[in-house]
Amino acid sequence: MKVALVGNPNTGKSTLFNAFTGLNQKIGNFPGVTVDKKTGFCKLPDGRGAEIIDLPGCYSLYPKSKDEAIVFNILSDKNNPSRPDIIVFIADSSNLKRNLLLFSQVADLGIPIVLALNMIDLARKNKLYIDVDKLSDKLGVQVIPISARENENIEALKNAIANAPAVALQNAWVDLPANSHTLVDKIVDEFQVESKYAGLQLAHHYETVSYLSPNEIGRLKSLTEEYDFQSQLLQTEETLARYSSIDELLAECVSKQPEVKGPSITDRIDAVVTHRFWGYIIFFFILLLIFQAIFSWAEYPMVMIENFFGWLDNIGHQFLPAGPLTDLLMDGVLAGLGGILVFIPQIAILFGFIAILEDTGYMSRITFLMDKIMRKVGLNGKSVVPMVGGLACAVPSIMAARSIENWKDRIITIMVTPLISCAARLPVYTILIALVVPDDKILGIFDLRGLTLMGLYLLGTFGAVFVAWIMKMIIKNKERSYFIMELPIYRTPRWNNVGLTIYEKVKTFVFEVGKIIIAISIVLWVMASYGPPQRMEKINAKYADPVMVNTHSEQELEQMMSSEKLENSYVGILGKAIEPVIRPLGFDWKIGIALITSLAAREVFVGTIATIYSVEDNGDDTANIRAKMASARNPTTGELVYTTATAFSLMVFYAFAMQCMSTIAVVKRETQGWKWPMIQLGYMTAMAYLASLIVYQLLK
Amino acid sequence: MKLSELKLGESGVIKEFSDLELSIKLLEMGCIPGETVILERIAPFGDPIAIKVSGYQLSLRKEDASTVILSS
């Protein structure tokens, strides 16, 4: 048996879903949209199992966005595997009028339905009394008062699901519009729709119905035109008619809500939290806390994960027979796996915070505070969280953009977040700054190196704002842009909900994004480790020569050999091939190689440079590498390689370039295709190239 | 008078809408002719605003609020 949860946002739908299914749930995606499809299993009191599907929260069956269209698409499509046998409609007991609007629409689709009155404890506390029996009688459906948060009456609700009739018994709420009967009958007949109301819905928004073929959409278009179907006007009339029957119903079944005296707790919190001064101070400190957490707290578990994989790598090389298979397993697969798992701490922490912000109701206040500022550049109030998160890492931040409902705002946020300078750029910046910026102070207090670093961060941020502004004008959106949003009352966060969110996000990342990351990292590893066989054999022979072996220490030999092998690998060949292209930026082929290897992750730049100049990469101590870079000269001209112009050009390049396969992978997952990650890779590379070109040519 | 012209703390009764498309969304969110609205909050830069309607708090941009006509 399939059961769908339907209801308005902020009514405790996901809490009920968690109460039904516990850890027994699966996250997928609805095709074509970025809404999590949550399904789970639940055992009913009579021993039957029920598959529960959590449909996205909405206020009406008339969709205002692609995401909201899912509800009607699933409920009205006979062939949809997710189409429920029973609907559990969850309503906020304190807000029945608005909630029953959607209920009345869903009930008219003709699927058996059970009404759950959630947060009944809150209603009781506010002295709001609902005559459940009368309501049930009038509606013709089972009505169960529950509190999903307190686990109250959940068993009774399960019983109601088990006892639900196989055919819908509810009465129709409103009559069809007077002059639409022939049209609706025709649609019901031609399209084999199960209820008249579903037929009417098709006439209203056939364009958003995913299961219709282009021919069918064309047919509906000509039918509605033929009958002069005034969609918007009829929707307004229908909504008003529904409200007036709801008013009659509520007058009979609900005691009049007593006037609340004085400001509520929510009002008092809002007075501070949305205050013109304190509101921003509080928000700033919350952002600071989140940033601090993903930047520094995540550091410890990340280092532990890295060390663990380093240890595994050592063990593997020690105990497995040496050979290409071991190398592939250890340096390709295992390193790729480590590269995925290392993101878990940041994802867990960021989503822990986001779940708390959403759960308490503070997230919508962020939108309220930031809407005006962010709207100017084409972003959304909620874009602030992913963008601040981007200072630490774009990967969890892009996943966080899911909380932005508007499609265009979400895409723009995803597209510009990687421009914010993330933690992985820091090693590249610091080594280059130390190389060319003198350790001086300006005006006695401002550290010149610190100022340069700050300049790079500002450059990234302004870049992001600029691109957002451009995209705002380029990207076309069929959805009309408006901003009408509920400010829910404040609640304490439900910790098991926070835990589940973290668990789900980590799981999604590891299994869906992880496979792309591991594939790219294996390709990069193979390209950096292998080259044309003749060349590699030559190098092996050279370093096996007794003259070489006797004149160099083992460590020197190893470093020189890996440097030469990298140079002759496929990556090395590619690096040399792109030299003419990157020459105008002041880069030589050695930098070219580092650019290619650091596609895996930006910080790889430092390690590659160390290998190329055959110095040992001591982790935190980069003095050796710096010394080698400072003295590196162009073999043909004899000029220094890392001049101020080249170093700045390189920093600017890293500020703007994508150079991160994990970001590409996560954008692919979040936008459901390769289109947006490829546009992003393209525009960021072009922007980096142009900016570096300008910087180098000016400073040269 | 328009909803966007209310002052902080003032209330009014919804009469009609001047934008048909937006009116559907507003109706669904509980802004129904005859309902009383109170302007509860104005965001720091003057926009958006938050109103109390149908027993809960709703935030909307002034631009959207200007399509809601209140009976005087």
Image (cartoon, coloured by chain):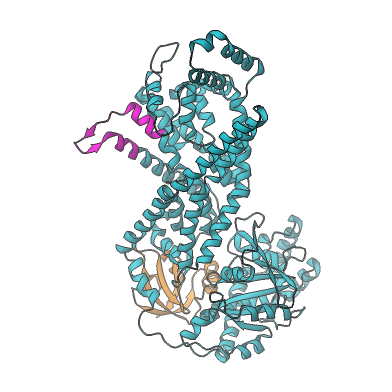
Residue A643 position (above or below residue A254): above
**In-image side of A390 versus A148 (left or right):** left
**In-image side of A200 versus A670 (left or right):** right
Residue at the farthest front position = A319
Q: Give the colour in which the image draws chain A.
A: cyan
Front-lying residue, A517 or A214: A517
Q: Quadrant of the C terminus of chain A?
A: top left
Taking the spot 51% from the left edge, 54% from the top edge, the residue there is: A348
| Picture quadrant where residue A437 is located | top left
| Picture quadrant where residue A698 is located | top left
Q: Quadrant of the N terminus of chain A?
A: bottom right
* Residue A55 magenta: no
In this view of the protein, can residue A564 be seen by the observer?
yes
Q: Give the colour in which the image draws chain B.
A: orange
Q: Position of residue A213 (x, y in %)?
A: 75, 57
The residue range painted magenta reads A428-454
In this view of the protein, can residue A177 be seen by the observer?
no
Taking the spot 27% from the left edge, 30% from the top edge, the residue there is: A439
Residue A40 position (above or below residue A93): above
